[in-house]
Image (cartoon, rainbow, N blue to C red):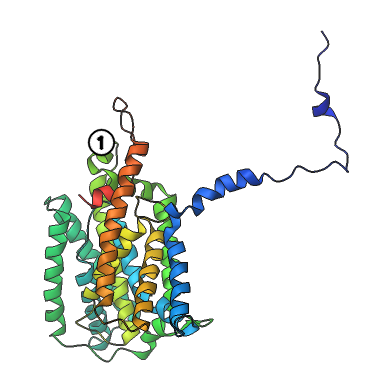
């Protein structure tokens, strides 16, 4: 039989044939979920806060205010991103305050009293931070101490070490050249803002786009299940603590460059904002999962809220109240989102667990 052909398929297309209209419905179907308030409610809230404070006070919407928020919160954002790695692995790190404070003193003392070059002083300070992370990781994985208790005890020891190393005195005499790493600007934007952006891109790529990140989330989603699936969870927990402490040490070094001294008071004030940002960030972009961009958004969302209240004449205790309330609300929301997501993606009871099943909402591990 002669083979039939589709005339429509073989007919030549004339130059004047109308082109197919773009599939706007399909585009909206793909983009719509990404713009859902459930995923980026923080973005919409940030916009509302900016509009409200701009109308409420004439001093808010200005280049000076925006630059101040961006610069002041750069250190908080860096600390919070380091903490996010630990939270993604399912562990708390309450020692970031002490680690940051000790790094501040060690870096200042090495440069001011030891005459060490800034580059070598920074390297040694980061190694001290990494060592603290290893200790935390071993206490949790080998000694099997609850991470909350282990890092709380470590933080207390670090606070004592700060006073021993500094002799309970601020350290002066920081080289002026070193202070330029925080004081200089590019196109009117302070350098710490670029540090935040660079670190955000690096950590986002590792956590979201590599097998390393998937195994980290698997560890946080359920350590025992991940171990049975072949993930070396002990190594990942220790590595998460090392990253958290090292990044906290980097923040401590930047504080030295920012204020020009080694201060015994650095660290404690960053603990609550970092945790609030970490848990609030888990409700953004990837609801139910700790993620870098959510954390950065949460840092600047909270900072904008506090800054606006301060410019409107709020009392000095408002920042603590605001951050504390945000932390409670964020933990509650992330818990609700985690339970909803687990209900949606939970495997059937008679199916064996796989690595993909373990890469779930890591807020579960961090809130045990």
Dot 1 crowding, Cα within 10 Å, few <14, some 14–19, many 20+: few
Number of numbered discs overlaid on the protein picture: 1
List x then y, in percent, for residue 244: 28, 62
Foreground pick, 114 / 310 = 310
List x then y, in percent, for residue 131: 21, 64
Give the side of residue 203 with respect to residue 123, left or right: right
Relative to residue 69, is residue 34 depicted above or below? Answer: above
Query: From where the camera sits, is residue 35 visible?
Result: yes
List x then y, in percent, for residue 23: 67, 44
Q: Which corner quadrant of the image does residue 94 belong to?
A: bottom left
Secondary element at image label 1: helix
Relative to residue 108, is residue 194 depicted above or below? Answer: above
Residue bearing mark 1:
228
Q: Which corner quadrant of the image does residue 248 belong to?
A: bottom left
Judged from this view, the residue extending furthest toward the front is: 56
Q: Residue at x 27, y 56 (%)?
A: 331
Q: Residue at x 12, y 50 (%)?
A: 144
Q: Residue at x 34, y 46 (%)?
A: 215
Relative to residue 91, is residue 44 depicted above or below? Answer: below
Q: Residue at x 32, y 65 (%)?
A: 80
Foreground pick, 28 / 357 = 28
List x then y, in percent, for residue 292: 39, 59
Query: From where the camera sits, is residue 127 visible?
Result: no
Foreground pick, 7 / 176 = 7
Q: Which corner quadrant of the image does residue 71 belong to?
A: bottom left
């Amino acid at each position: 039989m002669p083979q039939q052909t589709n005339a429509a398929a073989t007919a030549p297309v004339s130059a004047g044939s109308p082109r197919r209209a773009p599939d706007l419905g399909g585009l909206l179907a793909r983009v719509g979920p990404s713009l859902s308030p459930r995923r980026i409610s923080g973005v919409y809230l940030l916009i509302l806060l900016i509009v409200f404070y701009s109308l409420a006070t004439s001093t808010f919407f200005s280049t000076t205010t925006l630059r101040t928020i961006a610069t002041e919160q750069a250190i908080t954002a860096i600390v919070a991103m380091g903490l996010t790695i630990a939270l993604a692995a399912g562990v708390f790190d309450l020692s970031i305050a002490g680690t940051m404070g000790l790094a501040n003193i060690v870096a200042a003392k090495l440069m001011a009293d030891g005459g060490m070059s800034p580059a070598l002083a920074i390297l040694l300070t980061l190694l001290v931070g990494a060592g603290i992370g290893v200790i935390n990781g071993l206490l949790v994985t080998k000694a099997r101490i609850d991470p909350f208790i282990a890092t709380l005890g470590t933080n207390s020891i670090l606070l004592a070490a700060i006073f021993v190393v500094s002799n309970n005195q601020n350290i002066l005499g920081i080289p002026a050249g070193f202070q330029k790493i925080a004081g200089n600007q590019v196109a009117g934007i302070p350098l710490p803002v670029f540090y935040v952006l660079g670190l955000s891109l690096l950590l986002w790529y590792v956590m979201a786009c590599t097998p390393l990140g998937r195994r980290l989330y698997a560890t946080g989603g359920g350590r025992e299940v991940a171990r049975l699936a072949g993930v070396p969870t002990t190594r990942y927990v220790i590595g998460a603590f090392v990253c958290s402490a090292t990044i906290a040490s980097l923040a401590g070094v930047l504080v030295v460059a920012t204020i020009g001294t080694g201060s015994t008071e650095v660290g404690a004030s960053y603990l609550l904002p970092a945790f609030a940002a970490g848990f609030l960030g888990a409700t953004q972009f990837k609801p139910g999962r700790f993620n870098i961009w959510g954390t950065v958004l949460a840092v600047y969302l909270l900072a904008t809220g506090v800054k606006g209240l301060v410019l409107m004449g709020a009392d000095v205790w408002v920042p603590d109240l605001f951050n504390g309330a945000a932390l409670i609300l964020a933990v509650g929301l992330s818990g609700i989102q985690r339970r909803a997501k687990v209900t949606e993606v939970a495997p059937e009871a008679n199916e064996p667990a796989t690595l993909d099943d373990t890469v779930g909402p890591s807020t579960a591990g961090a809130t045990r």
